[in-house]
Image (tube, coloured by chain):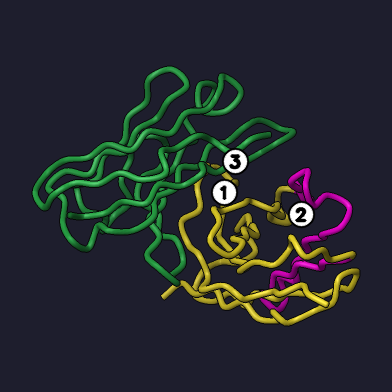
Chain colours: A yellow, B green
Amino acid sequence: EVQLVESGGALVKPGGSLRLSCAASEFTFTNAYMSWVRQAPGKGLEWLGRIKSKTDGGTTDDAAPVKGRFTISRDDSKNMLYLQMNSLKTEDTAVYYCTIGPGGGKGYIDVWGKGTTVTVSS
Amino acid sequence: QSALTQPASVSGSPGQSITISCTGTSSDVGGYNYVSWYQQHPDKAPKLLIYDVSKRPSGVSNRFSGSKSGNTVSLTISGLQAEDEADYYCCSYAGINTFYVFGTGTKVTVL
């Protein structure tokens, strides 16, 4: 079964940094476009950005609200996706989901992880 | 880029049909057929229901259907069931600067 397992969520102070990880299994990770999506408490979904497959350049596309503060990376040798978050703000408090897609020929997300919770508070 | 506009809530009785709208602009919904819909039960991850406006992934009930007219896409749930009570989100590709934008979300209540 295709699986995405996020980890690394924590309580962090404003201005702090955090790195989230996503372990992928049972699919060809190297060929996948991977994204991060978040959901603030009681709010809707927000796409944060994606990283293309290495075959397609391995570059990232970032949503404007987090551009310059959040960085997506991948380690295909470990089937791992990462989200480095810097200069965290209270409004970054959310559940963060790792997803397969969109991209790479499909304009949708077909697999979601269960999410990891980030709380930014003093 | 603003979120796509969805009604905050929609309700219906078991067996009825309901429709959830998702309105964007010509820069997102109206400009591309990369529109998808997701169902999210409380404290669960979202689940893909519809992609490319009207296609259903394998395993999704045919009670769910999607359509598009201009800058608005719609999700119709027919034969409403108690298990359909959840939040629903649309999502659209929005071009090479914004990339992807979600809708504001709709809470479906089965009366």
Q: Distance between the residues labelled 1 and 3?
A: 11 Å
Q: Distance between the residues labelled 2 and 3?
A: 22 Å
Q: In this view, does A101 lie above or below A119?
A: above
Q: Do labels 2 and 1 share a chain?
A: yes
Given residues A35 and B68, the one toward you in this image is: B68
Q: Do the residues labelled 2 and 3 touch (CB within 8 Å)?
A: no
Q: Position of residue B93 (x, y in %)?
A: 58, 36
- Residue occupying the point 32% across, 29% down: B67
Q: Is residue B81 above or below residue A78?
A: above
- Per the rendering, the mark at residue A58 is 2
Q: Name the residue under label 3.
A: B101
Kindly identify which chain the residue marked by label 1 belongs to. A
Q: Is-magenta flag for residue A83?
A: yes
Which amino acid does the dot numbered 1 rest on? Pro
Q: Mark 1 points at which residue?
A: A102
- Residue occupying the point 77% across, 72% down: A120
Q: How far apart are marks 2 and 1 (CA)?
A: 14 Å
- Residue occupying the point 27% across, 58% down: B85
Kindly identify which chain the residue marked by label 2 belongs to. A
Classify mark 3: helix, strand or loop: strand
Classify mark 2: helix, strand or loop: loop
Crowding near the residue tagged with mark 1, few <14, some 14–19, many ≥20 C-alpha atoms within 10 Å: many
**The N terminus of chain B sits in image quarter:** top right
Instruction: Left or right? Give the position of A23 relative to A88.
Output: left
- Per the rendering, the mark at residue B3 is none
Magenta-colored span = A57-86
Kindly identify which chain the residue marked by label 3 belongs to. B
- Residue occupying the point 61% across, 61% down: A40
Instruction: Report the label total.
Output: 3
